[in-house]
Each structure stands twice: as C-alpha cells, then as structure tokens.
Amino acid sequence: MTSCPDYKNLIDRYLDLDDPAQKAALDAHLATCASCAEYKADADKTMRLLRALKGRLTVAAPIDRAFEQLQTRLAASRRQMVWALSLVALLTVR
Ligand SMILES: [Zn+2]
C-alpha cells in the first residue's frame, strides 16, 4: 500500500478504518500529498452535506426534495455527486 490510488481507496473507507497503523500511514501521506489531501477534503465536505441532508429528512420534506437541494449544492463536483448517490442509497435502505 504505497501509491496514491491505494490511499484514495482508504480515504473512501476512512470512517470505517479500524486499523490504527493503516490510519496513521494514511494521515502521514495526507500531510505530504496535495492530491490525496484534496481528495480527502472533498470527501469530508460530502460527509458534511450528507449529515445536513439526513437532518432534513422528515415527513414534510421527503427524500427526493431533500436530495434536490443537495444536488444543487453539489453541482460543482461530479465526484461528490457519485459519493452522495451511493451514501444516500445506504441511508435510505436503513
Ligand atoms: Zn497521494
């Protein structure tokens, strides 16, 4: 596990990482790699948006309407959109 694509895979699973050594290696890489740090920043931003979306899900504001608002906010980033779609799918299954 030494290349950027490997680290980016780890970033996708960052919240689920339970191996401290793996997380430390990733954090060390993030401190030195602008590309991966930017990727992580995008991931964090997406997670914040999704938490906001989750808080907005009520009977009065169904998923499609909340998602519409999220889409507007995410218009700038296709990568975030892909994450949002997959994570919203996870949220709605539960
Ligand atoms: Zn990197």
Image: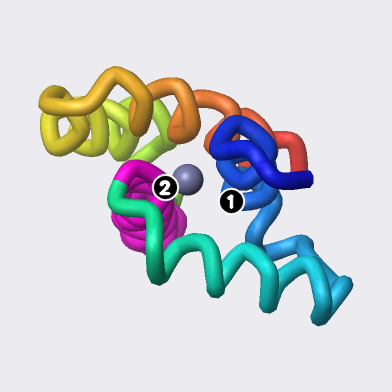
| SS class, disc 2 | helix
Q: Is residue 71 above or below residue 60?
A: above
Instruction: Name the residue rendered at 25%, 37% in the picture.
Output: 70
Whole-percent x, y for residue 26 in the image: 62, 64
Q: Check residue 11 in the rendering and tell me which mark sits there, or answer none.
A: 1
- Residue nearer the viewer, 35 or 78: 35
Question: In the figure, residue 51 lies in which quadrant?
Answer: bottom left
Residue 27 appears in the rendering: yes
How many other residues sit within 10 Å of disc 2, few (<14), some (14-19) or many (≥20)? some
Q: In this view, does 73 lie above or below 78?
A: below
How many other residues sit within 10 Å of disc 1, few (<14), some (14-19) or many (≥20)? many
Q: Check residue 36 in the rendering and tell me which mark sits there, or answer none.
A: 2
- Residue nearer the viewer, 89 or 26: 26
Ligand 1 neighbours mark 2 (CB distance < 8 Å)? yes
In the picture as drawn, the residue positioned furthest to the right comes out as 19
Colour scheme: rainbow
Instruction: Name the residue rendered at 36%, 55% in the picture.
Output: 37
Whole-percent x, y for residue 76 in the image: 12, 26
The mark nearer the N terminus, 2 or 1, is 1
Q: Which of marks 2 and 1 is in front?
A: 2
Q: Does the magenta stretch include residue 52?
A: yes
Which range of residues does the magenta coloring cover? 35-55
- Residue nearer the viewer, 76 or 36: 36
In-image side of 69 versus 66 (left or right): left
Residue 53 appears in the rendering: no
Whole-percent x, y for residue 5 in the image: 60, 31
- Tell me which amino acid carries mark 1: Ile
Disc 2/disc 1 C-alpha distance (Å): 8 Å
- Tell me which amino acid carries mark 2: Cys
| SS class, disc 1 | helix
Instruction: Name the residue rendered at 58%, 51% in the picture.
Output: 11
